[in-house]
Image (spheres, helix red, strand yellow):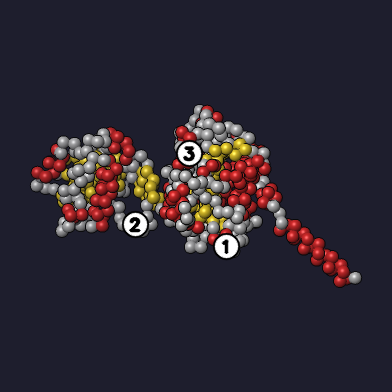
Amino acid sequence: MKNSKWKIWLGLVLITANACAQKTDLEKTEATVDQQTIKDHIYYLASDDLKGRNTGSEEIQVAANYLANQLESYGAQKVPGLEGYFQPVPLRIKTPASAGSLEYSGKSFDLNEDFIVVDGNSGDFEGEIVYLNYASEADFENAEVQGKIIFAKAGDGETTDRRTILNLSREKYERARAKGAAGLVEFYSSPSIPWGQLARGFNRANISIDSFEDKGELIPHLWLKDMDNANQRFMMTRSIKRASINIEGMVNEISKDKNVVAMVEGTDPELKDEFIMFSAHYDHIGVGAPNAEGDSIYNGTRDNAIGTVTVLSAAENIAKYPMRRSALFVMFTAEEKGLLGSRYLAENPVIPNNEIVFCWNSDNGGYNDTTISTIIGLERTTASQYIKDANVAFGLTAIDDPAGEQGLFDRSDNVSFARKGIPAPTYSLGFRAFDAEIMKYYHQQSDNPNTVDYEYLEKFFKSYVYASRMIGNADETPFWVEGDKYYETGVELYGKDN
């Protein structure tokens, strides 16, 4: 009798376990995506305490730690080769000089009116002048520049293109640093860009991708206005040739910014070598001038706390119910500064780019129709039907980009991977035009967590997660539609036959 009861109990356990194991992707989606959880995450990430999550700020570090802790709590794994759940991104943040002076041979020059600071740090610098023509590689040969301030002409004597002059200027600067020079001053005489425009350009805070390997000391790098070559002639005719430079208020440092990264290994012995990447940027634009209501914090609820939490929802679901394919979850820093976080990952992948078969990006400007989801690039990949079906399942309709004039495909992090050949649409809140309703919140202080429809967001999130599961479990690997701009790049990346 006891034996019989044991068998019945065991049978019930097996039946129950089998039923759980056979949940559909739709049921698995419903099991984890919860409106209150969505709301809690958004209210935290878009709170005043995080001050708009500006790149380089202390608050964006708090946000990164929060996201990493969530991923760890779900059971998502660290990516091999990374320390914890972060990929450090070497961003150089440079704030312009607030004051400064240049003097040589008894002649003084004023900041912005006469010279601009291209690079460097605050401080006082002095040294003997050495003149190196255009400061080319050949000009540096046999020149003794250690501890001296190099003076040279900007450009190469031929080009008038500003970008080329800038590139040449950077090369000269790195040569000067490598040789131990105390500074570099270039006589700028190109008429192609008005001096006032140049000064305005260099007097903005600047963020760029740099390198962790560059440990050398920064030296002052100046452009001296010299449209008629009078300043150059004056220097050449002086018998005492020393220069002094003063820079005040300039900060030039590598930030502590990072991409937040995690993964879940797939269940299929073969398909687990293919990764679906779920991505969103978690930065916004910080604090600015107050609006009429006195609010100065750009909380960034729509752009892009919602996108970030969409990816968190996928991570929670997939960590609990792994797909056949593996999943890579990435939240980028510095999207608002020029897609810098995603550009860095695309060039420094933590998973080889040819193993990432789909980038499922989530980014938003806002919404004006709660019956739809807008997918930027919907019809550009073979995954489009899964996305459409997932939206229908939750009472929404998936539409393609209705605002082609905005160039949205090329304005979000997806394009960093599309350029590598990875199919990469962007999942966005439902909009039918970039109209006044969108602009009411887009990059505005009014974009607060209490201004969004959470009933709609629940449907939106569930359709994203459900589509993700269908793509991650499909027999066929997603790819670009033939004829797409990036189709041939994809063929080359994955070694596909045309």
User: In terms of secondary structure, where does tag 3 sit?
Assistant: helix
User: Which mark, by number, is residue 227?
Assistant: none
User: In terms of secondary structure, where does tag 1 sit?
Assistant: loop
CA–CA distance in space, label 1 to label 2: 41 Å
User: Which mark, by number, is residue 270?
Assistant: 1
Is 36 located above or below residue 200 in the figure? below
The label nearer to you, 2 versus 3, is 3
Q: Would residue 45 be seen by someone viewing this image from the given angle?
A: no
CA–CA distance in space, label 2 to label 3: 34 Å
Q: Are marks 3 and 1 in contact (CB under 8 Å)?
A: no
Q: Would residue 392 be seen by someone viewing this image from the given angle?
A: yes
| Nearer-the-camera pick, 68 or 340 | 340
Q: Which residue is mark 2?
A: 214
N-terminal-most mark, 3 or 1 = 1
The label nearer to you, 1 versus 2, is 1
Residue 432 position, x and y percent, is 55, 32
Q: Amino acid at mark 1?
A: Glu
Q: Amino acid at mark 3?
A: Leu
